């Protein structure tokens, strides 16, 4: 093909790809424009995924009628006039690209009335072509409607994720901006249903409750600016809120950072936040934080990325330190009562490199390293009654245990586990009742017969087998057993359900609520009956019976976190994740003392699991030391 200059339309569509990746990026650009126009109230309405219609209206200063066509031109902006202006920027926009890009890949209508004019104007653009400009009556402010995003770039449409994912991105984005601009009233509706709103009261805590949910907010402490670490560094102020070590999440996505009012992604600064929790959180757990960072405008370069989601700092270490110190200071004021997690190489004092001035007396007064990780809630005085034996289906006790006479003969101490309570399969007073499962073929053995020797650290079961010693993680083993049972019952549509009586209601944040709406059909099939009870508030009516002993709201939160994070290797579907989480929640915990009977019952079932070696999340269940290995270790060979 000979070299050619691309037509303007194609060039615009290609360029649009950089700015407009998905519906949420359109919302971001339009929100930023409204904020730049000084709006105090912004309404966002989404229909369909957002590719059908995105409508944003604001009460900002509006655009003069004669400038409206210009606003849609490429590189047309009212925000800068020289390159130097970028380095003293007080607006979010400056590239003059967003409206042009959006208009080139959608059917866009812009209606605006400038505050100094008495009538407004409307422009219609389709795929970058202006169809009409005319005067209209309109309130002061701007309304932009973006219909059929990517209608003329079908290839792009294919890259959009599921409707649900696109909606979640929008919710997350709007609630983020609401947190950074508490003085602005935001309202987001999805297909006519309110998904989020903030009041514009100017009070950050109000918005945090709306955006993160009351339960998360209750666990947050305030971060306030500290005097600079060194006088020669620029003044950097860090405000916001961050969770105490009592609340943590499986991923970093809930660490939200703003620099001069701009939402940014910055791995280093995210790391600064994580670093501030050094020794305070378990490995691979992260806080929820909302941090507003103020830097002198000439110390930050925002012209790094087309979507302006990344920035470059003139003194990156100074910003890093300011964030890390601010968060550390806020969190450590709570650390006296919090659990302390020491890393393997713990050597006496928590090391947080950049933070030389955390009050040393505080750090020194932290409790000494514990022998056990602190999250294990040991309570030797009142051993928790093991729940394991109650969760075994009846038929196993009837058919399997009795059939295993070899086990009884071999291990005289063996006692049959207590019968289960959840699914009473046999009606004792009905002589004709056929014990359920009696005719079922027994599952093949996948482990040799094991004899329980005892329990270590209230977490591991020591067992003896024909060829050596087995050390078994009780939680992982139980998770595996429940998983295989639950899966089988689920597939056979034989799940037992437990009603939740008077469970109260649970308030979710807007993203969680959206997620719940999406996964509700799957949850319903598993026995979760959840009903809406006001905006983003729900009641759990029933749960799968294996969760009878658990706090239904806590389980719900865990399920939602899992559905969001998508981290289990090889596990694709939501359904799979939920199954695994349910079993994890129901399984006996590490730190729970088990009776000999409970342990033997657990091992007995593990012996017939299809995969007795790894838990449903892929971690090992057992360590096997063969007689040969033992002999070698003791120098007998
Ligand atoms: P930028 O924000 O980088 O200037 P945009 O393409 O996003 O570029 O917008 C172009 C121009 O249109 C802006 O500079 C501004 O003057 C005007 N504009 C866009 N949206 C609004 C709005 N909601 N209210 C007032 N003016 C707006
Ligand atoms: Mg803009």
Image (cartoon, rainbow, N blue to C red):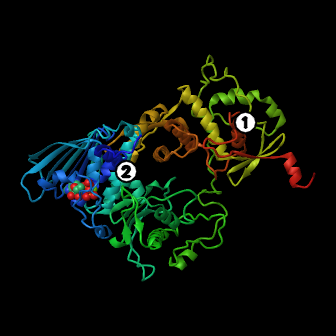
Q: Which residue is mark 2?
A: 18
Residue 241 falls in image quadrant: bottom left
Tag 1's secondary structure? loop
Image quadrant of ligand 2?
bottom left
Q: Residue furthest right?
A: 637
Q: Is 513 left, or right, of 354 in this rendering? A: left
User: Image quadrant for the N terminus?
Assistant: top left
Instruction: Name the residue rendered at 32%, 57% in the picture.
Output: 177
Instruction: Name the residue rendered at 53%, 35% in the picture.
Output: 545
- Residue 40 rendering spot, x and y as whole percentages: 21, 58
Of tags 2 and 1, which is closer to the observer?
Answer: 2
Q: Tell me: is circle 1 under 8 Å from ligand 2.
A: no
Tag 2's secondary structure? helix
Task: Give the alpha-carbon distance from disc 2 to disc 1, as whole Å.
Answer: 55 Å
Q: Is residue 39 visible?
A: no
Q: Which residue is mark 1?
A: 607
Q: Residue furthest bottom?
A: 231
- Tell me whether circle 2 and circle 1 mark residues in contact (CB < 8 Å): no
- Residue 32 rendering spot, x and y as whole percentages: 28, 56
Q: Residue furthest left?
A: 118
- Residue 561 rendering spot, x and y as whole percentages: 47, 47
> In the image, is residue 92 above or below residue 511?
below
Q: Viewer-proximal residue, 185 or 229? A: 229
């Amino acid at each position: 093909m000979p070299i050619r200059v691309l037509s303007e339309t194609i060039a615009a569509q290609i360029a649009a790809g950089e700015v407009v990746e998905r519906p949420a990026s359109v919302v971001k650009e339009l929100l930023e424009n409204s904020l730049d126009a000084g709006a105090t109230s912004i309404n966002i309405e989404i229909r369909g995924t957002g590719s059908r219609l995105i409508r944003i209206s604001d009460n900002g200063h509006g655009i003069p009628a004669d400038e409206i066509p210009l606003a849609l031109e490429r590189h047309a902006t009212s925000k800068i006039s020289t390159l130097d202006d970028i380095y003293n920027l007080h607006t979010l926009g400056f590239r003059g690209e967003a409206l042009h890009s959006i208009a080139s890949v959608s059917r866009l209508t812009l209606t605006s009335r400038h505050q100094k004019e008495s009538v407004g104007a409307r422009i219609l653009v389709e795929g970058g072509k202006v169809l009409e400009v005319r005067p209209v009556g309109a309130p002061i402010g701007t309304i932009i409607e973006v219909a059929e995003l990517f209608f003329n770039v079908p290839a792009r449409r294919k890259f959009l994720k599921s409707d649900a994912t696109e909606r979640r991105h929008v919710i997350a984005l709007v609630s983020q901006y609401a947190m950074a601009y508490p003085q602005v009233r935001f309202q987001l509706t999805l297909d006519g249903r309110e998904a989020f709103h903030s009041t514009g009261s100017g009070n950050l805590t109000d918005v945090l409750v709306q955006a993160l949910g009351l339960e998360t907010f209750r666990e947050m402490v305030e971060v306030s600016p500290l005097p600079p670490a060194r006088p020669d560094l620029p003044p950097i102020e860090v405000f916001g809120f961050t969770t105490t070590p009592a609340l943590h999440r499986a991923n970093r996505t809930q660490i939200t950072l703003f620099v001069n009012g701009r939402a940014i992604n910055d791995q280093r600064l995210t790391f600064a936040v994580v670093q501030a929790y050094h020794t305070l959180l378990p490995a691979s757990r992260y806080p929820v934080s909302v941090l507003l960072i103020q830097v002198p405008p000439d110390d930050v370069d925002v012209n790094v990325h087309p979507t302006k989601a990344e920035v470059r700092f003139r003194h990156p270490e100074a910003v890093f330190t300011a964030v890390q110190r601010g968060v550390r200071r806020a969190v450590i004021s709570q650390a006296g009562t919090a659990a302390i997690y020491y890393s393997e190489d713990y050597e006496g004092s928590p090391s947080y490199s950049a933070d030389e001035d955390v009050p040393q007396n505080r750090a020194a007064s932290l409790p000494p390293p514990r022998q056990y990780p602190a999250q294990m809630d040991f309570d030797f005085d009142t051993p928790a009654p093991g729940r394991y034996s109650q969760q075994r289906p009846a038929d196993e006790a009837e058919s399997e245990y009795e059939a295993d006479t070899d086990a009884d003969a071999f291990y005289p101490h063996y006692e049959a586990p207590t019968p289960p309570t959840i699914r009473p399969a046999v009606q004792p007073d009905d002589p004709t009742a056929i014990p359920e499962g009696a005719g079922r073929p027994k599952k093949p053995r996948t482990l040799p017969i094991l004899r329980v020797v005892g329990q270590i650290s209230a977490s591991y079961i020591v067992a003896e087998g024909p060829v050596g010693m087995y050390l078994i993680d009780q939680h992982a083993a139980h998770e595996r057993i429940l998983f295989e049972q639950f899966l089988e019952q689920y597939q056979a549509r034989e799940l037992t359900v437990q009603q939740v009586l008077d469970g109260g209601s649970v308030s979710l944040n807007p993203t969680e609520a959206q997620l719940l709406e999406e996964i509700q059909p799957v949850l319903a099939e598993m026995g979760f009956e959840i009903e809406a009870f006001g905006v983003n508030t729900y009641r759990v009516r029933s749960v799968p019976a294996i969760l009878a002993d658990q706090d239904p709201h806590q389980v719900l939160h865990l399920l939602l976190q899992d559905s969001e994070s998508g981290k289990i290797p090889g596990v694709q579907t939501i359904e799979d994740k939920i199954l695994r989480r349910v079993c994890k929640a129901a399984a006996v915990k590490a730190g729970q003392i088990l009776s000999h009977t409970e342990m033997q019952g657990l091992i007995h079932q593990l012996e017939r699991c299809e995969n007795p070696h790894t838990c449903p999340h892929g971690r090992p269940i057992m360590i096997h030391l063969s007689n040969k290995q033992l002999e070698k270790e003791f120098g007998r060979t």
